[in-house]
Structures are given as C-alpha cells and as structure tokens.
Amino acid sequence: MIEQLRGEGEIAESKSRIKLPIHSRPRQPADSLSWADAAESFRRLRRLALNVLRKDKTLKVGLKTKAKACSWDDQYLLNILTQ
C-alpha cells in the first residue's frame, strides 16, 4: 500500500505542502517588563489619580463623579492636571 502511495506521489506532495515560518518572532529579553510590573505601575498611577481627585475642592461631589466630570469637561480636567 505504501508503495502505491509513493508511486502516485501523494506522500511527497503532502510533505511539500507543510509551510514553516521563515522568520519567527524574536524573544523578549529576560529583563523585559513583566505583567506583574505593569500591573503594579498601573496600580500606582490609579492611586495617584485618585489622590489628586481627593485633594480637589472645586466640586462638592464624590470621586466617581469627579472622574466622570474630568471626561465631560476639558476645562475641569485641565484644572485637575495643573494642580
């Protein structure tokens, strides 16, 4: 049976259809930023933003509303960022 397949060239054709990538993606260096480092950095940035909103006394509303107000009003966002 194998001889019949080889005679018809099916095995040779199936092997020639296998595509291997010419270039593989290079690996990141060992000291690259890990997910844990990125999560900690984001946590610190979020904490900093909440502290800035807590210090703001122009609006007498909660933190959630102050954060929404920053997205609604560009002037308020500029006021928060320049404090």
Image: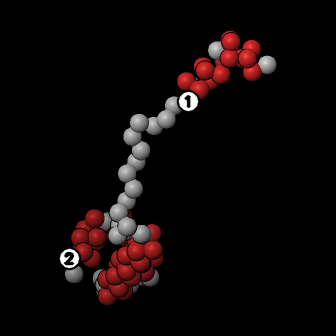
The residue under label 1 is 18
Vertical order, 61 against 68 (above or below): below
Categorize mark 1 by other alpha carbons within 10 Å: few (<14), some (14-19), many (20+): few
Vertical order, 81 against 9 (above or below): below
The residue under label 2 is 82
Q: Residue at x 39, y 40 (%)?
A: 23
- Residue found at the very far front of the displayed protein: 3
1 left or right of 80 in image: right
Front position in the image: 67 or 39? 39
Q: Residue at x 64, y 15 (%)?
A: 9
Q: Nearer the viewer, mark 2 or mark 1?
A: 1
**Among the two numbered marks 2 and 1 on one chain, the one whose residue lies closer to the N terminus:** 1
30 left or right of 78 in image: right
Q: Can residue 59 be seen from the camera position used here?
A: no
Name the secondary structure under disc 1.
Answer: loop
The reply to whether callout 2 and callout 1 are in contact (CB within 8 Å) is no
Front position in the image: 39 or 45? 39
Categorize mark 2 by other alpha carbons within 10 Å: few (<14), some (14-19), many (20+): few
Front position in the image: 6 or 26? 6
Please state which amino acid type lies under the numbered disc 2: Thr
Please state which amino acid type lies under the numbered disc 1: Ile
Question: Residue 39: image x %, image y %?
Answer: 44, 73
Q: Residue at x 49, y 35 (%)?
A: 20
Question: Residue 82: image x %, image y %?
Answer: 20, 76
